[in-house]
Amino acid sequence: MGSQRLSVVVTRRLPEVVETRMKELFDVELRDDDTPMTRDELASAMQRADVLVPTLTDQIDQGMLAKAGDKLKLIANYGAGVDHIDVATARQRGILVANTPGVSADDTADMTLAMILAVTRRIPEGLALMHAGGWQGWSPTAMLGGRIAGRRLGILGMGRIGQAVAKRARCFGMQVHYHNRRRLHAAIEAEHEATYWESLDQMVSRMDIISINCPHTPSTFHLMNARRLKLMKPDAVIVNTSRGEVIDENALTRMLRAGEIAGAGLDVFERGPDINPRLRDLDNVVLLPHMGSATREGRIEMGEKVIINIKTFADGHRPPDQVVPGVL
């Protein structure tokens, strides 16, 4: 398959250097404005493209895949998470799915630590006080937060991002604990001085800070449900830079309002931008607009991975980042 004849449809605006490179390599159709495609636009794109380059804002479910044309042979996702794509159905229809893993691990881990510090040291409250002109000068008892050194950090999901969080947490003097589908190799545990918990319930009940770093899959939906959130210590903090669906957002909001959990840092939300308005009113919550992987360097690297996946496929080979159903 000659790459010049490969028709590629991109569903969102990408960094300019990535779009320019795509124009050089493929017969590419780029998005003019930075809004998500409607379902109809997406269905139309899937009928006329050899390759679709979607993002997490595009729901490519069974019904959408049923509308795909015979041309579509590759979905080269821009992003590591593929919970918005029905990978198994795509495979049945002879459509390969690729993603961009590993690129955003350091960026997301940096943001995780930033949020842990923001919540425990009350940074947004301090900012708000300054911007409102309410600061009256230093006081020995004003704006007291907590020290993170010595605190127990429980990482839920010890993949690339979880391990990058662990590495940073050790530098801050935190004790690293983790729960994962599979226990890590002893050498990796030793490298991070990490303690494995087979029981998520037991880990949650003993941690000072919980960091959500697992992907959203059917088995992780509401993994932190109301029952499990109630196991957390009242002075504990939860941070999520993964996917909003992993936490029951309404249950979390109720518990934060009731003072049953000390604080939360959320970069992702269960219903995207439709955030529980009660969350916005709380002083002990840091909310960010899904910025975890938002660095110029990271977004360009993601684009480069997409291009390599398409180019490799065009040359008749298996994309290096092909997603295999059942391995998720």
Image (cartoon, grey):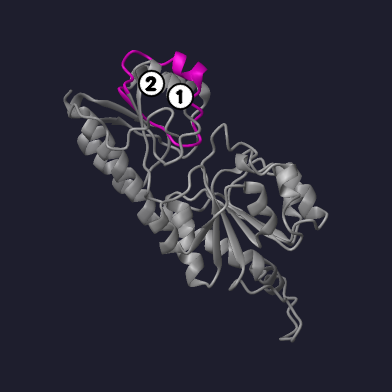
Residue 162 can be seen in this image: yes
Question: Is 156 placed left or right of 132 in the picture?
Answer: left
Q: Is residue 257 above or below residue 225?
A: below
Q: Position of residue 6 (x, y in %)?
A: 24, 25
Q: Where is residue 323 in the image (x, y as percent from the top left)?
A: 37, 32
Mark 1–mark 2 distance (CA, rounded to whole Å): 19 Å
Up-down relation of residue 149 to residue 14 (above or below): below
Kind of residue at badge 2:
Arg
- Report the side of 180 relative to 238 (left or right): left
Find numbered disc 2 in the image and state the secondary structure of the residue it sits on.
helix
Dot 1: element: helix
- The quadrant of the rendering that contains the N terminus is top left
* Residue bearing the label numbered 1: 42
Residue 19 locus on image (x, y percent):
31, 41
The quarter holding residue 258 reads bottom right
* Stretch in magenta: 50-73
Tag 1 and tag 2, C-beta contact below 8 Å: no
Q: Which residue is drawn at 57% across and 47% down?
A: 198
In the displayed structure, does residue 270 sit left or right of residue 46? right
Q: Is residue 159 magenta?
A: no
Magenta span: chief secondary structure: loop
> Which mark, residue 298?
none
Name the one closer to the observer, 153 or 188: 188
Residue 293 in view, yes or no? no
* Label 2 CA crowd tier, 10 Å (few <14, some 14–19, many 20+): some
Decide which of 215, 85 is in the foreground and name it: 215
Q: Nearer the viewer, mark 1 or mark 2?
A: 2
Dot label at residue 91: 2
Residue 72 drawn in magenta: yes
